[in-house]
Image: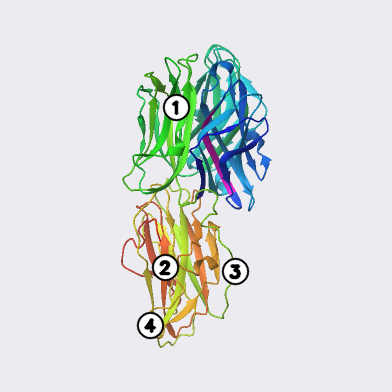
Amino acid sequence: MAVFQATATASTTIASATYALLSGMTLTPGAGDYILSFTSSFTCSSQSDVFIEVFVNGVAVAHTERQYYCESSIVDAYQQAQVYAYLPSVGAGQAVEIRWKRESSGTATCLERTLTLQEVSSSDVQQATATAVTNTSSSSDVLMNSMTLSAGYTGDHVAYFSTSMYGGSGADMRISIYVDGVQVAHTLRRQFQEGSIPDTAFIMGIVAGFSANSGDTIEVRWREDGGGDTINALERTLVLQEVSYDQATATATTTRDVNSLALMSGMTLTPGAGDYLAFFTTSIEADGGTSDAHTALFDNGSEVTHTNRTLTIDSSTPDTEFPNATHAYISGLGDAEDIDIRWSMAGGDLATAWERTLVLIPAEVASSSSSSSSSSLSSSSSSSSSSLSSSSVSESSSSSSTSSCDTTIVEDIAVYSSSSVSSSSSSSSSSSSSSESSSSSSSSESSSSSSSSESSSSSSESSSSSSSSSSLSSSSSSSSESSSSAVPFGCPTAIQVNTCTASGGDHISLCSCSDDDTFCMNECVGTPGFDFDIIYEGMNPAFQYTILFEYRYLGNPGHIIKLRVFIYNTLTFDNVTGVVDAFTSNTTF
């Protein structure tokens, strides 16, 4: 899963009723399918609606428009912005942007902000959208119009939802995620339309993980909890992703009255070494006078500054719950390091956080800003010969329900002929295989023909695995060994996908060491494991060959990865070494 991120910490303003780019919030990720997430804090200096919307290649994505009404009694009060959407079929060179405007008067201001795009497989994502206004006055949870999806497989899912909502004076708006008719309790989000701010639109959202069975209905339900007022939802989006996750949740309230950032109760995770997308959502209220509450993500004790979100509790709206959200892509987390949410409350007022959720999604391959994914590579073909060699990379997993989309990234593979050996066999093909398993030997590399001996050496690895997904990358160079008779063999000529998918690169990506070109293999969702053949042509049985396999594997440390060699005279794979786990998890080539 490639992740792209744009961030900004400097405030920016707009005084226009025409949509314009929100400073710094643009990414050009390359062709693919993506889940977009955007969070920030914003306000306006006078009574006006402030709008944000997603644009792809200059075209608005209509269901993503969100608005906050800066009512006259709460001008200059900061509220939260959050948008989540699935963007299928983004084209090469197309920009994905957050644009904004203020509708009538004044100057709108936006503070710290974060935009991420996570590359996904279309088979792993569903989306429900609507642009027409819907309403309810029900005091019990009912389906929000159009916000329903059906789980496509049994396992882990993450749901993303956001909309703009408003109601009459005293309306108490509640939204929740339901799975197969059962409320996911920690996903309850609240917004109270205090008497001085009737019909004021606020942006509400939820990001949460849960397990679902194939066919289960995933719904956003809502209710009005204040006595029969009508509440309304504008443009809205529900995204359902099949993906492993780590999550911290809480349903009991927690409070803070100190103006320094400290851990929010229950909101800390230690997921293991790796890279992660982190999402946090809750509802916060406060008593007393006008003051600001802040929330931020922390990475190993250090604030991720672009995630600091400001929520202004105006003196005219005491004890009023408001939505709160932040998120970020966090890379290079150490094995025993934490990701947590910390918060503060200024002015000596008492802030209360309600139901809350912190979700981490493992990210095996990550990029920032608008640079292209490291797994997106060119294609070409190498010379051919009547002799064929095939290297197979495969993964299997028998026990980990959390590994719903593991990935292998192959950087480069080089095959060298280092010395002549006698051979009575006319066969000149070889095959190698590497695989992952949580139970038995499963990784293998290539072999020469029946009478030519072959050895395999892997490069050094450093440990850094993510807790709920796995990734393997491999690399080698095309120069010859330090042998007087060493002859460079060259590039593989093809890659054959047997099971599951490749998300970037091809056989040419494997030709040069340390060039950032990679071939990325993805595990089947719901069917752990993958299988690929990397094919070489021109193998000479009169020579001894060495294959260098340099890799990066980010994944479940409980999975066993072994190196095997395919023997053509027996048509079987055999372990190259007696090591139980030949490829330990690591983060660098």
Q: Which residue is mark 2?
A: 549
Tell me: residue 513, above or below residue 62: below
Q: Position of residue 127 (x, y in %)?
A: 60, 39
Amino acid at circle 1: Ala
Q: Earlier in the sequence, mark 3 or mark 2?
A: 3
Look at the image and say whether residue 388 sits in the magenta stretch.
Answer: no
Q: Position of residue 464 (x, y in %)?
A: 36, 53
Nearer the observer, disc 1 or disc 4? 4
Q: Position of residue 51 (x, y in %)?
A: 62, 30
- Going 51% across and 57% down the picture, which residue do you hit? 374
Amino acid at circle 2: Phe
5 or 410, which is in the foreground?
5
Nearer the observer, disc 4 or disc 2? 4
Q: Which mark is residue 483?
A: 4
517 or 75, which is in the foreground?
75
Q: Which residue is mark 1?
A: 185
In contact (CB < 8 Å): disc 1 and disc 3: no
Label 4: how many Cα within 10 Å (few below 14, some 14–19, many 20+): few
For the magenta stretch, what is the residue range?
Answer: 33-42
Q: Earlier in the sequence, mark 4 or mark 2?
A: 4
Q: Which mark is residue 418?
A: none
- Circle 3 — which element? loop
Q: Position of residue 84 (x, y in %)?
A: 56, 37
